[in-house]
Amino acid sequence: MKHNDDHTLDPLFAEARGHHPFGEPVDFGFETRLRAALGASGPGFAECLASLSWRFSAAFLPLILAAFVFLAMRHHHALPDGVGGIVSQWAGLLPLPI
Amino acid sequence: MFFFDTSRATRKVETEIPESEWVARAGKGDEDAFVHLAANYRQRIWATASRFARSRPELEDLVQDLLVKLWRGLPSYRSDAPFEHWVMTVAVRGCYDFLRSNRRRRESECLVDPTERREDPDPSDERTRSRREAWETVSLLLGRLDPKDRVLITLLDLEERGVRETAELTGWSEANVKVRAHRARKKMREFLSELGLEP
């Protein structure tokens, strides 16, 4: 497919296309080197973060809420009334003189 | 003594397994399946990556890194797109990352690996020499572009890929590809005239 509308670069690209600067890859030792590289490549920080990304998705909000309610009920057998009650109840668990 | 050629039999069995199965196996962590896939796609990755590397050892390292990226990314591959397209997308984006991360170092290095000249199959061949010289000039011009433009010109003009395909491979919009490529070619023409290499 042609994209160039000028005649300065066209012949240059056409010639350059036919040149393979480093020849062909060598098969000898390819598999050994690849296996060594795969063995040495543990998951990095980015991969670990990507694997955790589902935990931050909105789809898990109900699950997080359910876990919160479950924990609240387990500690006090009943949910306190209103948001203020929840805040003061959980604030009471903080190691601070509130 | 009679020897049974097991390699030929194994090769036949391997070719009968569809690629999708190799991909599925590799995605589940089967290293042998991935090595099989890597051997099949290595040539294509090599051809694209060779436009960005400056020496054969650098190219070998780059191809190796791209294969490792593919191995790490395989669990996230969705079979709704052709596997080859996904491989080339990872390879092109990997080459772009490579250009960005090595930009400063590349600027201070010589442009043509002198050992490669000695490896020419037949330096007296006029056609070969003409192609090599054209590549050296293009390489010189590409070296003065920023990594994004360099990737675009390589895909569009050296690999003769379409605008849409280039946009898909790079993840940039078609409009962006067109505008950037147009500006990059303009810059290349200017560099060419600065260097006095205009025909």
Image (cartoon, rainbow, N blue to C red):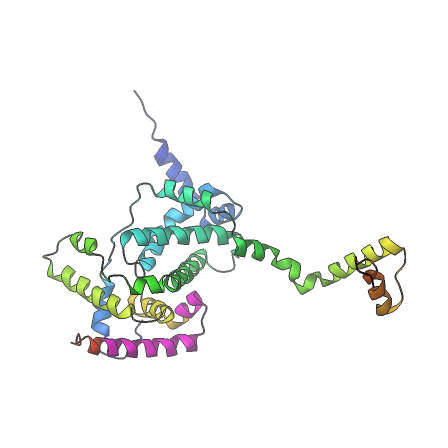
Report the number of numbered marks. Answer: 0
Nearer to the camera, B1 or B197? B197
> Can residue A81 be spotted in the picture?
yes
Q: Is residue A7 magenta?
A: no
Residue B151 sits in quarter: bottom left
Nearer to the camera, B113 or A65? B113
Residue B177: image location, x then y, percent: 40, 74
Residue A16: image location, x then y, percent: 23, 65
Q: Quadrant of the N terminus of chain B?
A: top left
Q: Quadrant of the C terminus of chain B?
A: bottom left
Residue B182: image location, x then y, percent: 33, 78
Nearer to the camera, B101 or B164? B101
Nearer to the camera, A8 or B57? B57
Q: Is residue B182 magenta?
A: yes
What's the magenta bit mostly, secondary-structure-wise? helix
Residue B117 sits in quarter: bottom left
Residue B148: image location, x then y, percent: 38, 70
The residue most toward the front is A97
Residue drawn where x is 41% and y is 71% of the image:
B164
The residue most toward the top is B1
> Can residue A8 be spotted in the picture?
no
Left or right side of B44 for A41: right
Above or below, comparing residue B33 to residue B113 in the picture: above
Residue drawn where x is 70% and y is 60% of the image:
A60
Query: Which span of residues is magenta-colored?
Result: B165-191
Residue drawn where x is 47% and y is 50% of the image:
B71
Residue B45 sits in quarter: bottom left
